[in-house]
Amino acid sequence: MHSTGTIGALLQQKGSTVWSTQPDATVYQAIELMAEKGVGALAVLEGGRLVGMFSERDYTRKVILKGKSSRTTPVREIMSDHDLVVAAPGDGIVASMDIMTERRVRHLPVVENGALLGLVSMGDLVKWVMSEQTAAIEQLTRYVMGEA
């Protein structure tokens, strides 16, 4: 698969809104925000700095299956923070997809000089690649039909 796009270009198109929570918020508060915003993950920020990610997967595996209470368990206790996978704006789309697949993550924070610039999902990356492929097919079709 060949893609010429970068994570930065995707963020420019998608927008850089990042929904976040704090490590001391309860899991219930984080899940409530995720439901309200229609997202599957939140960046966990402390003092404006990315310290982890909290996802639906964290909730199901580390709260529900372990019998913890979402109303009393802090996000800090179950967020993913070990070997946090991040991307830079100049990283390629396909390379980022490969890393996400290899590391089994569905959401990738985009960080530059320590600042969180945005968040991309595997769905965002797939949509980008599909859009590029559709444009290439349309261009080739016009060429073959003599319209180019």
Image (cartoon, rainbow, N blue to C red):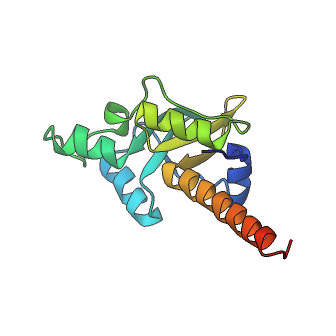
Which quadrant, please, contains the N terminus? Answer: top right
Q: Residue at x 43, y 36 (%)?
A: 23
Residue 29 visible within the image = yes
Pick the residue in front: 97 or 22. Answer: 97
Snapshot quadrant of residue 62: top left
- Outermost residue on the left side: it is 67
- On the rendered structure, is 29 left or right of 51? left
- On the rendered structure, is 91 left or right of 49? right
Q: How many marks?
A: 0
Q: Residue at x 24, y 47 (%)?
A: 70
Pick the residue in front: 93 or 59. Answer: 93
Q: Residue at x 71, y 61 (%)?
A: 136
Residue 144, compared with residue 102, is above or below; it is below
How far across and how far down the image is residue 36, in percent? 42, 65
Snapshot quadrant of residue 57: top left
Snapshot quadrant of residue 35: bottom left
How far across and how far down the image is residue 46, in percent? 53, 34
How far across and how far down the image is residue 94, in percent? 60, 41
Pick the residue in front: 95 or 105. Answer: 95
Q: Residue at x 37, y 35 (%)?
A: 79
How far across and how far down the image is residue 140, in percent? 74, 65
- On the rendered structure, is 131 left or right of 102? right
Residue 63, compared with residue 134, is above or below; it is above
- On the rendered structure, is 6 left or right of 103? right
Which quadrant, please, contains the C terminus? Answer: bottom right
Residue 47 visible within the image = no
Pick the residue in front: 61 or 101. Answer: 101
